[in-house]
Image (cartoon, helix red, strand yellow):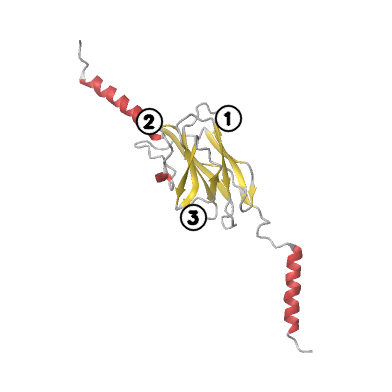
Amino acid sequence: MTSRPPAVWLLLLAAVLGRVREGRGFSNGSVASSCETLLPGHHPYNASTLASPYTVSASASTYRPGDSITVTMEMASNGSIPFQGFILQAMSRAGQEGWPVGCFTNINTSLTNTLRCRGMQNSSISHSSPTKKQRLQVTWEAPSNSSSGDIYFCASFVQTYSTFWVKVTSGDVRLDSSVNRIPAGSMTALLLTALSLGWGGLSP
């Protein structure tokens, strides 16, 4: 039996380790360490600078506090390779960068995991298995108040251990402008009340 040269054994070892590392990179989506940067931590690789073959979109262009919105992550029309891993958050245009808003509900645990980011339960969502995904929908619930203002969805997608895209964004979902508006009838009543109170203190 002929022995293999040392160089061949090294190449085989590198290939095996690479496959193990690739499988470990997106095994169950427990990526809480990625909450702030949305980076998968696949060293020594960097995020791709090519146009993302995946998209993020929302089922509504406006929202009110407490509303539920369906968020779709899918292959772009010109895409050909499904994604295996992802992490998704809703972000506020008015808020501090890196702080997710709202929460994800109706979790399908066979496909997704929720994450506690910045101390907020279910504020982010990721994959629970490395199965290949062409399209995936999740449900996001808006905060109960209007302080977040306009929001957008931001996701990172993992195609393979060495190929991934970071911070792919949806279009803006605007806070319904009527939320903080006082109805005209109510405003008139307030003005009349204020005037009557003011006049009541005048001497004849």
Kindly identify which residue carries mark 3.
96
Identified by mark 1, the residue type is Ser
Q: Secondary structure at mark 2?
A: helix
Quadrant into which the N terminus falls: top left
State the residue at coordinates (53%, 41%). Answer: 107
Mark nearer the N terminus (3 vs 1):
1
Identified by mark 2, the residue type is Glu
Percent across and percent down for residue 113 are: 47, 40
Distance in Å between CA atoms under marks 3 and 2: 33 Å
Circle number at residue 22: 2
Observer-nearest residue: 110 or 196?
A: 110
Query: For the residues carrying marks 3 and 2, which lies nearer the camera in this image?
Result: 2
Q: Quadrant of residue 153?
A: top right
Kindly identify which residue carries mark 1.
77
Figure check: 152 above or below 22 = below
Percent across and percent down for residue 77 are: 58, 29
Graded by Cα atoms within 10 Å as few (under 14), some (14 to 19) or many (20 or more), the crowding at tag 3 reads few
State the residue at coordinates (66%, 57%). Answer: 179
Percent across and percent down for residue 32 are: 42, 45
Percent across and percent down for residue 182 are: 70, 63
- The reply to whether residue 91 is in sight is yes
Residue furthest right as drawn = 204
Residues under numbered marks 2 and 1 in contact, where contact means CB atoms less than 8 Å apart? no
